[in-house]
Image (cartoon, rainbow, N blue to C red):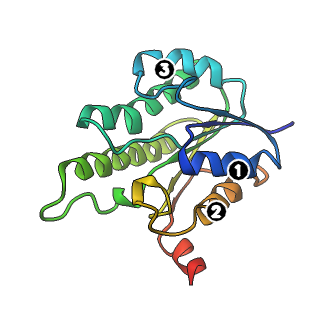
Amino acid sequence: MVEQVAIVGSGTLGNSLFSKLRLHCLTTQFTRDKIDLSRISKAEEYAMILQQYNKIVFVAGTFKGTTSDIFTVNTLTPIEIIHCLKNLGWKGQIIVTGSTGATWTSWPGADLTRLAYNNSKRTLREWCLGFNQSQPRDIYITVIDPCRFQSPMSDYNGYPVEQVVDVYLDVLLKDGVCTQHIEMLNAVNDKAD
């Protein structure tokens, strides 16, 4: 079977992943004008678009807006799309992009926007891990929690995005599918030294 991968989102990570992944398999990137995760009411429509792919990667996310905006884009719409895919009988692999911020969600004096972002990613991670434990193995979800990498969100501080993309490629290009949680604290930090 020819691998067909959908990448939902653009930005630094999505664009870098697309440019490398398309060298290995059929890859389509859906930017906000095609799949807008701020529009949860369109989740079923988006699932119908995505069901033609055997692998789906959610890289879209936001750190801006209200708490509701942040949770809708980062958590609620991706979860609703997965639910719709399951109802459509879709089978395949999904990678969702979390954040190492999901591990340390708060600290004294934490900004409320940061608190919303970190907890939206933690909720997404926990839901996906729960899905993997509770459902038959038709849909396999891998959660990747990247550390800080060079992008507008980090003011271009952190590790080169290519190191993060390599982790996604390792998961996507394996024979078979897997369910796992990859927290990129040491893996990327070790490569950077």
As measured in the structure, the alpha-carbon distance from the residue carrying label 2 to the one carrying label 1 is: 15 Å
Q: Earlier in the sequence, mark 2 or mark 1?
A: 2
Query: What residue is rendered at 44% in x and 67% in y?
Result: 157
Question: Is the C-beta separation of discs 2 and 1 under 8 Å?
Answer: no
Which amino acid type corresponds to the residue marked 1 in the rendered image? Leu
Q: Earlier in the sequence, mark 3 or mark 2?
A: 3
Which residue in the protein does label 2 denote? Answer: 162
Reply above or below: 139 against 47: below
- Residue 174, given in percent of the width and then of the height, sits at 76, 55
Mark 3 vs mark 2, foreground winner is: 2
Residue located farthest toward the left when viewing the structure as drawn = 109
Identify the element where label 3 is drawn.
helix
Q: Which mark is residue 146?
A: none
- Residue 171, given in percent of the width and then of the height, sits at 67, 55
As measured in the structure, the alpha-carbon distance from the residue carrying label 3 to the one carrying label 2 is: 30 Å
Reply above or below: 162 against 40: below
Identify the element where label 2 is drawn.
helix
- Residue 105, given in percent of the width and then of the height, sits at 27, 57
Which amino acid type corresponds to the residue marked 3 in the rendered image? Ala
Dot 3: few (<14), some (14–19), or many (≥20) neighbours within 10 Å?
Answer: many
Which residue in the protein does label 1 denote? Answer: 172
